[in-house]
Amino acid sequence: MTTNVESPSAVDAARVRLKKLRWVQLIIGIVCMVMIANLQYGWTLFVTPMSEAHNWSRAAIQGTFTVFVLTETWLVPVEGYLVDRFGPRIVIMAGGMLVGLGWALNSVAGSLPFLYVGQAISGIGAGAVYGTCVGNALKWFPERRGLAAGLTAAGFGAGSALTVVPISSMIASSGYAATFLYFGLGQGLIVVVLGYFLAKPDANTVAALPKPSAIVAARPQLGWKQMLQTKVFWVMYLMFVLMAAGGLLFTANLKQVAEDFKIAKVPVSLIGLTLPAATFALSIDRVLNGITRPFFGWVSDRIGRENTMFIAFFAEAIGVVLLSQFGANPVLFVVLSGMVFFAWGEIYSLFPSTCADTYGWKFAAGNAGVLYTAKGTAALLVPYLTGMAGSSNWHAVFWIIATMNFAAAVLSIVVLKPMRRRLMAQPAQVQPPAQEQVPA
């Protein structure tokens, strides 16, 4: 009878490769994520220049941002499936090409429909890169999934921090179109080059990887169809939507909020720097939005995913309420917006690591991709909330967001934690079909 159990010598050899490869793989994924960060987090810098150049409304322009998020997220399950089946290289290289093409099209868009096309292509490319890098990190670090997913997602969250000032300066000096073109092509090219060196762990390497806790290691390897049959997934999906909506709204509108609060250009001096309030907030928010992902991922590896969710989600609700009440003060706007982004960005490490813990490592990229579509669902709320705010009603919108954050915090402890514990205590009750079973 043939067995797939590897010999000790093969496993030992795999351990040697593992020490050299897995941190290199993680670093490559982080850098690729940095290269696509501006597609989402730099967008707010382009809104006002495009509106002034073409007389397009903010709501219409933010509609194209929603198109970006939808194509970035809702196609990730397909891209994750391709990664699980064929490996990360071809998917991420294709994604890099689409990233460059999308922003190149944005640079010459003279109508909103044309801009929608550019944003859709950008979103497909960004989703291919994002889903590939996070899925690969989950596979290479099964015992540190929270930290690995957090470090990878940190590249996306903080990656635009260093380019806020250069992009703002280039828009002012050369126009938004040239900025779209040169940053888009440069970022896409780097992704294509680095993507060539990405690889998934082979069977020997998987055998050599440090093991997670016994209950996690013993999970059956469920594909997305089996995952969708569990109530745990849908609770996580709802929580993801509740948390993502507010963060996406701030991402797309932070500069506009500062302008409506009449503080965007007011100088703020903190930590030895003096910058206009809007520029300062954008820079520090990106840094904190990146730091939070590995930080809370690391915390969740130690105190549990749901406990960490409750702490972070409740802090987000408090931060949004405080920003609503005191955001008209330029210094507090910078500080409190930083708090909001710090308590929000961790969803991109907590949810994929929780998903992989619950449903297994083999289909981690595809399963995390299906869950990631919740971000696209949340993006549908952004134009509606932006329109509700107009130029004078941000406070009401902030209270709506805070309520959603608080609801997600309660769900994490009251519903998700006991429900997931019951599912993971009885792994034999939910089995994948024969063709998706992991080889012995």
Image (tube, helix red, strand yellow):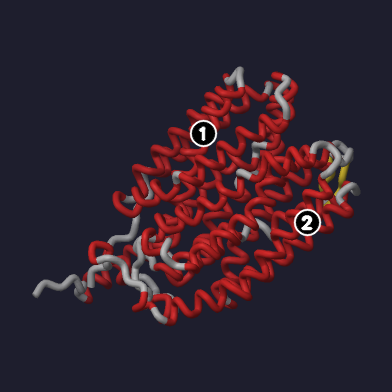
State the residue lying farthest toward the left. 1
Disc 1/disc 2 C-alpha distance (Å): 30 Å
Q: Is residue 261 left or right of residue 235?
A: right
Q: Position of residue 198 (x, y in %)?
A: 38, 50
The numbered dot on residue 120 is: 1
Classify 10 Å Cα crowding around label 2: few (below 14), some (14-19), many (20 and above). Answer: many
Question: Which quadrant would residue 12 be assigned to in this image?
Answer: bottom left
Question: Do tag 1 and tag 2 residues touch (Cβ < 8 Å)?
Answer: no
Look at the image and tell me whether residue 275 can be seen: no
Q: Position of residue 391 (x, y in %)?
A: 83, 37
Look at the image and tell me whether residue 417 can be seen: yes
User: What is the quadrant of the N terminus in the image?
Assistant: bottom left
Q: Nearer the viewer, residue 280 or 68?
A: 68
Determine the residue positioned at 56% across, 64% down: 350
Considering the numbered disc 1 on the image, is that residue within a helix, a strand or a loop?
helix
Q: Position of residue 178 (x, y in %)?
A: 61, 22
Determine the residue positioned at 48% across, 44% down: 127
Is residue 120 positioned above or below 309 on the image? above
Q: Amino acid at mark 1?
A: Ala
Determine the residue positioned at 60% across, 28% down: 180
User: What is the quadrant of the C terminus in the image?
Assistant: bottom left
Classify 10 Å Cα crowding around label 1: few (below 14), some (14-19), many (20 and above). Answer: many
Q: Amino acid at mark 2?
A: Val
Sequence-wise, the earlier of marks 1 and 2 is 1
Q: Nearer the viewer, residue 176 or 218?
A: 218
Q: Position of residue 408 (x, y in %)?
A: 65, 64
From the image, tell me which residue sits under label 2.
Answer: 320
Determine the residue positioned at 69% across, 70% down: 311
Considering the numbered disc 2 on the image, is that residue within a helix, a strand or a loop?
helix
